[in-house]
Image: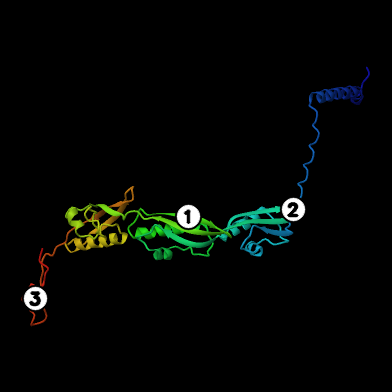
Amino acid sequence: MSHITLSARLARVAPALVLLLTLAGAADAQRRPPTPPPAPAAPAAPAQEIRQIQHIVVLGTQRIEPSTVISYISLREGDIYSDQTSDTALKTLYQTGLFADVKVRFDGSTLTISVVENPIINQIDFEGNSKVTTKDLEKEVQLKPRMVFTRSKVQADVQRIIELYRRNGKFAASVDPQIIQRPQNRVDLIFSITEGPTTGVSRINFIGNKVFDDDTLKGQIATSESDWYKFLATNDNYDPDRLTFDREQLRRFYNTRGYADFRVVSAVAELTQDRRSFYITFTVDEGQRYTFDKVQIESKIRELTPAALRPLVKIQSG
């Protein structure tokens, strides 16, 4: 019987194994999807364009020199232009108060600044004022002739005039500013005033008072309610300073009657819808009343005996 060695057997089987593995690999390759081609590389970001200012042009000026406009901004020829520097220049020029409109444009290498100047005030007049003199009004407003006109400054002066009338008891006063255009970018400013009636006090109320009634307390304060037959009275006009005085008057009234802890919690003035009168409400805390249990008089002066001093002392026990 012949013997076949292990190496001889492997030599016979090896070609079949190689063929089998080759066929299996080919079948597996047919089942797998084809490998996609590699993605193309992302294009390189273009270099950011450097916008250098070669020229600065100012348009629209009338009284103001172009060099003055340029002096207000930080941009100069040779600087790099950006949206941020443009916004900063725009805000800076508006903040000067000299211009009603500003535009900044960069084209090629030229920075163009277009402006519309605010007008100059030619004169200021007041119309409709009879209770407040023109001289007092001129002292109150901040705008003067030859100053630059801006709407924000006009509105601020309108509010100052209204406050002046309120201090004079006229809370219904209104002011309408009127602008008259003049040549050479100048304007006349007219404050048209409707003074309205003097604002009175239609009702005074007290809250928290138990010891003294409303009529008694009304008799202690300076402010009084308006009556039709008191058209010449002045104390029935609303005055914030008088209201402060009334608080002190109430405190003194209660203190002299033993109410040392008395206080005015609040004093509220409410303006009616027609702005012709006020409702005033005092909220008070009367507190406890203190009395003297016993009054004794002592004297170290021999000639002034307690009996002689007793008639001079107004304080009584209880």
Depicted 226 relative to depicted 20: above or below = below
- Give the Cα separation between the discs numbered 1 and 2: 44 Å
As drawn, the label of residue 108 is: 2
Secondary element under disc 2, as helix, strand or loop, is loop
On the rendered structure, is 275 left or right of 41? left
- The residue lying furthest to the bottom in this view is 302
Q: Quadrant of residue 129?
A: bottom left
293 shown above or below 46: below
Which residue corresponds to the image point at 27% horizontal and 56% vertical from the top-left? 265
As drawn, the residue found furthest toward the left would be: 307
Answer with left or right where residue 80 lies relative to residue 265.
right
Residue 128 picture quarter: bottom left
State the separation of the CA atoms marked 3 and 2: 104 Å
Mark 1–mark 3 Cα distance, whole angstroms, equals: 75 Å
Mark 1 vs mark 3: give the one in front.
1
Q: Secondary structure at mark 3?
A: helix
Residue 98 rendering spot, x and y as whole percentages: 57, 60
Q: Which mark is residue 178?
A: 1
Task: Mark 1 vs mark 2: give the one in front.
Answer: 1
Q: Residue 309: which disc?
A: 3
What x and y, as percent, mark residue 200?
Answer: 28, 54
Q: Earlier in the sequence, mark 1 or mark 3?
A: 1
Closer to the chain start, of discs 1 and 2, is: 2
Residue depth check, mark 3 versus mark 2: number of the one nearer the observer? 2
Q: Is residue 103 visible?
A: yes
Answer yes or no: is residue 261 visible. no
Q: Badge 3, how many Cα within 10 Å: few under 14, some, many 20+?
A: few
Task: Identify residue type, mark 2.
Answer: Gly
Question: Which of marks 2 and 3 precedes in the sequence?
Answer: 2
